[in-house]
Image (cartoon, rainbow, N blue to C red):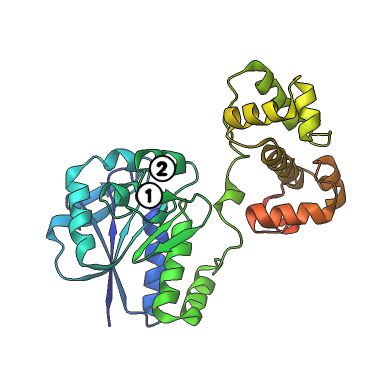
Amino acid sequence: MQRRILIVVFPGFQLLDMAGPADVFSTAAMLGGGYKVEVAAVRAGAVPAGNGIAVTASALGEVRGPLDTLLVTGGLTAPDQARDPELIGGITTLAADARRVASVCNGAFLLAQAGLLDRRRATTHWLAAGELQDRYESVEVDADPLYIEDGNVWTSAGVLSGVDLALALVARDHGHTMARDVARGLVVYLHRPGGQSQFSTPMSAMTPRSEPMRELQAYIDANPAADLSVPALAAHVGMSERHFSRVFTAQTGLSPGRYVERSRADTARRLLEVTGHPLDTVARESGLGTAETLYRVFRRRWRISPGDHRRRFHSKER
């Protein structure tokens, strides 16, 4: 049985969002997977990617016959492309007859605009997650997973996570063995450990409105090994513990305890990336105390071990 994979592109799309999944499916086809990859856009002809390389696409309105998978790419222009009625109309029409629908990176904006993510859990590039949630309140956005399956709709995180998504689709269609063989052929992980938060910039929290809270936030980040208990922090700004906790949470979006742990975890992450310190030293200097606590925090926050993070991100040149 041949499975038609239609990849939707638009001017300014991310080339890797198309090329990664396309190579996964074409490699699986060589192994007997029966995939046929096609590319379509609003208008037939050459469609320039964000890096200037153009691909040849057919017209969405001229696509005929049933589709196995409709896969929508992302790119820097995707949020603006979501306002193109021809593009969204084409996606909506083709999705109705496709066995499943998927997006790569912020291609999720196009699925959301087409109503395909309503009341569904979805992911996108970590940089775009906040905007996606703000624009489409009916979507439950989770910025950490590399991909999410909700019914017959799949979404993936940033850029190369489209490869993770495509491998998962091959595994669903043909089993683990074929997906493993495709991954080996492409020299990529079949299942990458952790989520995309391990690749994101250090934690995000709202900047406090008041000067005392801003100064305290900076103090916490600069002194991870200090006493950062609620009593100590409340005394630092001259507030009662109860009032301090309420004000800090309201102005940063995080409780004091949660903010401190995240700040210490990000400090530990940076130390692992730029130093060769032993894990117990990293734990002590980041305020996490022991290597055991460091390990637990990393497993809980990023689903990888501190050692794995160092092996993947440590720079010997720093």
Q: Secondary structure at mark 1?
A: loop
Please tell me which residue is depicted at 51% across the width and 71% down the height of the picture.
Answer: 183
Residue 59 appears in the rendering? no
Position in image of residue 282 (x %, y %): 82, 46
Q: Secondary structure at mark 2?
A: helix
40 left or right, relative to 160: left
Q: Are marks 2 and 1 in contact (CB under 8 Å)?
A: yes
Disc 2 residue type (three-letter): Gln
Kindly indicate the quadrant of the structure image that contains residue 2: bottom left
Q: How many marks?
A: 2
Q: Is residue 3 above or below residue 293?
A: below
Residue 229 appears in the rendering? yes
Kindly indicate the quadrant of the structure image that contains residue 8: bottom left
Q: Is residue 301 above or below residue 35?
A: above
Kindly indicate the quadrant of the structure image that contains residue 304: bottom right
Disc 1 residue type (three-letter): Val
Please tell me which residue is depicted at 70% across the width and 38% down the height of the picture.
Answer: 263
Query: Which residue, given by chain and number where applicable, does mark 1 sit on?
Result: 139
Label ID, residue 133: 2
Label ID, residue 242: none
CA neighbours of label 2 inside 10 A, class few (<14), some (14 to 19), many (20+): some
Quadrant in which the C terminus is drawn: top right
